[in-house]
Amino acid sequence: MKHRALLVAVAATVAACSPSPDVDVESADLIAGPLRPDGQAGLPDATDGPSDDDQAPTGAIAWGPCDDFGIPERTTQQTPNWECGRLTVDMDPFGVDASLGSVELALTRHRATGDRLGSLLINPGGPGAAGLPTAWGLRSAMPTELLRGFDIVSWDPRGVGRSMPVIDCGGADSFDVGYMATCVALTGELSAYLAAPYSAADMEAIRVALGEQRLDYLGFSYGSILGSEFARAHPDRVGAFVLDGVTDPLVGSTDGPFEGAFAVFADDGRDEAFDRLIELCDLTDRCLPGRSAAVVVDLLYLSVGDLATDDFDADPARVTVEDFQRLLDQSLGFAGDWELLATALDDADGGDASALASMIAGPDGDGPGGESVSNFADANFMIYCADLGRWSVDSTFCDGLPANERAVQQVSAVDIDVPMLVIGTEYDPLTPGKHAPDFAAAIGDASHLIWEGVGHTAFPGWTDCIDDAVAAQFVSNVRPPDGTRCSMIEDAVDDTELADDLFGYGESEAIDWLTDAIEVHERVDGDAACIASGMIVDGVVDDRIVSHMVLDVTSDASTVAATAAAARC
């Protein structure tokens, strides 16, 4: 069964945005969507802590509460055991200039709940994605073996999120002439120390501070570049590595991928991912019955700006073509919301864009008690220029950024004790799975695994095939045979059954979604679980009603169904 998306996302899903340079921004999309609560059967009790004999080693990080780091209240309700702290590192870890300032990295940690094996450091990619909200959102979806055996640790990379100093562009528009110069003026000397090798050096400082002999690491998307750079610099310190959603291994050379004048981190996979979405939608009556999905989408590009959103009481009041395109791009990055997309497209084809507007608006920040801090877009562009600006010689976008003396290099072979596990998603819009075998071959000591899914990154939660492979790599240092393939959803015998599952709710899944929706949106009073169960009549799930409840679309049908179920409770 595919996993259930939380209504209050911990980190914003990032899909293909293309401001001034046509550069896709990348982060692990699964961190924004489906999460399993700690209390789910099979997972350790959220209140469990390590035994006195399994305490983590003490390093140079003063761990304490996360209240000042913006942890969402929902996260602390799931488990109160998150710690946060800061680690001071050199601005230039390769230099001897004492006049340079330092960088304070913000970190978070959740202790292992069983027999401790070590620390597992996580990076969400980007570049420029913050690690703290990633860890807070990701942990509860991870396999039990990892939660019991490892301290889950992540950090906001230099210049990002709650690390200091922060990348700052003063609200400048990336389309403005002189955008990068503005960013440099406000960011200061850190501008010359942002490329991947500097963050890889920070990873080594984190390893030392954690007291680990070797680094166990889970890197998503751009995080695969950080993993490669760390292994190049510290091969004897490489523990178990899993790199999910890997880039083109030739990034950092003239042979790397380009889009027009811009060097990029990976080939553009959006067309292939979109074609797969359309193909699957056309195979099931639970998407756009009796219609061509491609035709519906094409017509909506022409009409969406004129459609009413009367059943959604928030902005946007009108859906623009640009909004619609961004939503489709985001949907390619995470297939766990395709039930919502199917309803939104169906409604819009009938003249009502309320569900589209709700999907575009997204969840309301981090929820009660959380304070979102994100400089993702500015950090993405500055780090991009630090890494790849030297190859984008026919563009002036990166002009003004001081040269970063240590620059990202193409992936090369490393001699490590534990071979890496490299994961690619066949229809990944941002880092296509075709890069995975080449990346693994370039590393040398690595095997690759392909998830036959649509989305940006594969782990965790989609299939046991993926989750078990990742857990085995960290717990036992074993990997499946090179080239192993995992189906998008287990037990789907063909694409028609796969499409039915992706675009429609199962009964238990619908009850879970409805329970969350009733608790979060408070449209009806009463016991949320009872009302949710009562909205499924004789085992029949009305996909539209479920989607409307989840999206807080106040259609007559959803209001009547919820009110009737509440009366029966």
Image (tube, helix red, strand yellow):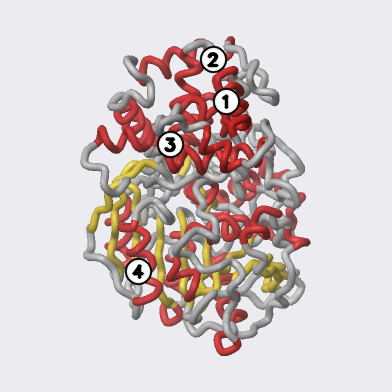
Of callouts 1 and 2, the N-terminal one: 2
Q: Which numbered marker is on residue 332?
A: 3
From the image, tell me which residue sits under label 1.
323
What numbered label is drawn on residue 420?
A: 4
Q: Element under label 4?
A: strand
> Secondary structure under badge 1?
helix
Q: Residue at x 55, y 27 (%)?
A: 548
Q: Do the numbered discs 1 and 2 sit on residues whose CB atoms are within 8 Å?
A: yes
Location of residue 197 in the rendering, given as x and y in whole percent from the top left corner: 53, 66
Q: CA distance from mark 4 to mark 1?
A: 39 Å
Q: Earlier in the sequence, mark 3 or mark 2?
A: 2
Question: What distance separates the C-alpha of mark 3 from that of mark 2?
Answer: 19 Å
Figure check: 310 above or below 210: above
Q: Amino acid at mark 2?
A: Val
Residue type highlighted by circle 3: Leu
At horizontal 43% and vertical 36% (from top left) the residue drawn is 332
| Callout 4 amino acid | Met
Can you see residue 253?
A: no
Q: Earlier in the sequence, mark 4 or mark 3?
A: 3
Figure check: 53 above or below 149:
below
Q: Marks 1/2: CA distance?
A: 10 Å
Disc on res. 279: none
